[in-house]
Amino acid sequence: MHHQEFEAPEELRDTINCFWYIRRNGGEGQANFEVQPDGFAEIIFYFGNLSNISYNSGLQPLPSPFMMGLLNQPAIFYTQNRLEIIGIRCYPWTVFDLLSITPGKEGLRVFEHPIARLQTILDELIRAGRIEEAIAEIKQYFLDARSHVAADSMLFKAGNAMSKANGTLPVRRVAEAAHATVRTLERKFKGSTGHSVKDVSGLMRFEQVRNQLWLNPDANLAGLAHELGYTDQSHLSREFKRYSGTTPAAFARKAKQGKSIAGDDFVAFVQS
């Protein structure tokens, strides 16, 4: 599997974390891969075969593009033969305003939107191997969209504080960073994301544990629990299993076996 990341232009960095591209070369038979939850919303364009997704025990066909919101459990994608993906990794407190759609808690969201008009242009560029030009088209689309969105300084300050602390700040401290009361912040945050501050913080913390275990499977769980603000190791393990469907120890064993970013049955995006 080939994976590239592209920085967001400075004008978009308050709304978009990065752009990314993946190419998977599968066989003729159906294959599946797993995407773990994290603290971002992803807008996904794909080229090739990505026919179904298993989420909450259901299968459904996927259009391109679609949006993956904040997941509370792993999602399983099914593919066959060629698959190339361009993703836009967005902060959950900005993505709905950026797209001018109503916030929701759906893990997978299918919706009609003018952004879909990019599909034909991007497909032509991807088939020609002109990946950077395809990314440039998407960047320009979002630069134009961003120019019509009024920035919410409260949400930006809150999100920035949460990101810097990797989700470890209590809600009270997040509100202080945003110069808001807890009640006002929670109302505006849920109105923009469909989730509470605590929901998103929990995903951010899980993502940090997952990434550290992936890169260092022998990491000390008690130490990670203390570093990331869990009550204790048991609390970390419960939260990890809640989001990943497996225990930290089992996940670490899988990482040791080499089933990481290049594996056929597991995909996640480790952030530096």
Image: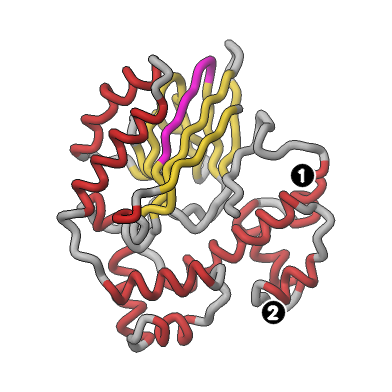
Quadrant hosting residue 237: bottom right
Give how far across and how far down residue 199 sits, in percent. 48, 68
Residue at image mark 1: 255
**What residue is drawn where x is 43% and y is 53%?**
17
Magenta stretch prevailing secondary structure: strand
Write the start and end of the magenta stretch as one range.
80-87
Give how far across and how far down residue 28 sits, in percent. 58, 11
228 or 77: nearer the viewer: 228
Q: Is residue 201 above or below residue 53?
A: below
Disc 1 packing (10 Å; few <14; some 14–19; many ≥20): some
Q: Is residue 48 above or below residue 174?
A: above
Secondary structure type for disc 2:
loop
* Residue 231 numbered mark, or none: 2
**What residue is drawn where x is 30% and y is 65%?**
192
Q: Point out the frontmost of discs 2 and 1.
A: 1
**What residue is drawn where x is 29% and y is 58%?**
103
